[in-house]
């Protein structure tokens, strides 16, 4: 909150008039990050009409273009949604649902899903892979030290390769 207040050139107390907690502020920023990610997805879907780009490649590539979004994913349900106001959580979920419903018909068609329900479930599953793998592939400094030992090489996971392969396998199950 201090940094946001300083950057915005407003008093910290003024921020609390609009955002009851720092989690409310962060969740509202995350809404914007989601909207940017969905804008990127819309571009992919438009390009997919003329250029063959695999969704798993696009999906993991989108993380490079939306790093703050990716870094925030693991804390949304674990921290932000636990400490944000009901109003902000409702706003977040509503914005997310709006974005999903907007792209779902084109997403379903472009990726060859049998139904929009299947496409929705796939999006939720791919999202879950992205979140779950992030915690395994972004270890703390102490864990990194332990992973230097060759005995633990199996735990050294390439995030993008892991998520890409997981999404490919998941997608093949829907076809």
Image (cartoon, grey):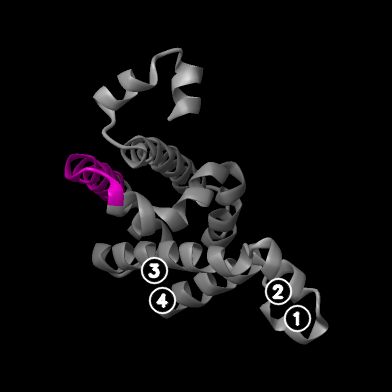
Rendering coords of residue 148 (x, y %)? 80, 74
Q: Within 10 angstroms of label 2, few (less than 14), some, or many (20 or more) residues?
A: some
Q: Label 2, secondary structure: give it.
A: loop
Identify the disc placed on residue 85: none
Q: Which label lies toward us, 3 or 2?
A: 2
Which badge, 1 or 3, comes first in the chain's sequence?
Answer: 3
Q: Residue at x 33, y 64 (%)?
A: 119
Q: Is residue 138 above or below residue 162?
A: above
Q: Within 10 angstroms of label 3, few (less than 14), some, or many (20 or more) residues?
A: some
Could you say which is closer to the camera, residue 169 or residue 69? 69
Q: Is residue 79 above or below residue 14?
A: below
Identify the disc placed on residue 156: 2
Range drawn in magenta: 83-101
* Distance between mark 3 and mark 2 Cα atoms: 23 Å
Q: Label 3, secondary structure: give it.
A: helix
| Proximity of marks 1 and 3: CB atoms separated by less than 8 Å | no
Could you say which is closer to the camera, residue 18 or residue 41? 18
Q: Is residue 135 above or below residue 51?
A: below
* Distance between mark 1 and mark 3 Cα atoms: 27 Å
| Proximity of marks 1 and 2: CB atoms separated by less than 8 Å | yes
Q: Which residue is mark 3?
A: 125
* Residue 154 placement, left or right of 88: right
Q: Is residue 109 visible?
A: no
Q: Which residue is mark 4?
A: 175
* Distance between mark 1 and mark 4 Cα atoms: 34 Å
Please identify the quadrant where the C terminus is shown: bottom left
Q: Is residue 42 visible?
A: yes
Which badge, 1 or 4, comes first in the chain's sequence?
Answer: 1
Q: Label 4, secondary structure: give it.
A: loop
Q: Residue at x 31, y 38 (%)?
A: 24
Q: Residue at x 24, y 66 (%)?
A: 117
């Amino acid at each position: 909150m201090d940094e946001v207040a300083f950057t915005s050139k407003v008093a910290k107390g003024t921020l609390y008039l609009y955002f009851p907690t720092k989690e409310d502020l962060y969740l509202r920023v995350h809404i914007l990050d989601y909207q940017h990610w969905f804008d990127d997805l819309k571009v992919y879907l438009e390009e997919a009409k003329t250029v063959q780009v695999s969704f798993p490649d696009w999906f993991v590539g989108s993380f490079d273009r939306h790093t703050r979004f990716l870094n925030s994913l693991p804390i949304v349900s674990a921290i932000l949604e636990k400490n944000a106001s009901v109003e902000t959580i409702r706003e977040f979920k509503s914005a997310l649902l709006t974005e999903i419903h907007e792209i779902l018909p084109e997403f379903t068609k472009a990726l060859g899903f049998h139904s929009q329900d299947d496409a929705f479930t796939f999006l939720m599953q791919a999202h879950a892979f992205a979140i779950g793998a992030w915690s395994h592939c972004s270890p703390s400094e102490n864990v990194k030290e332990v992973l230097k030992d060759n005995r633990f090489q199996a735990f050294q996971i390439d995030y993008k390769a892991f998520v890409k392969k997981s999404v490919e396998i998941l997608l093949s199950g829907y076809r």
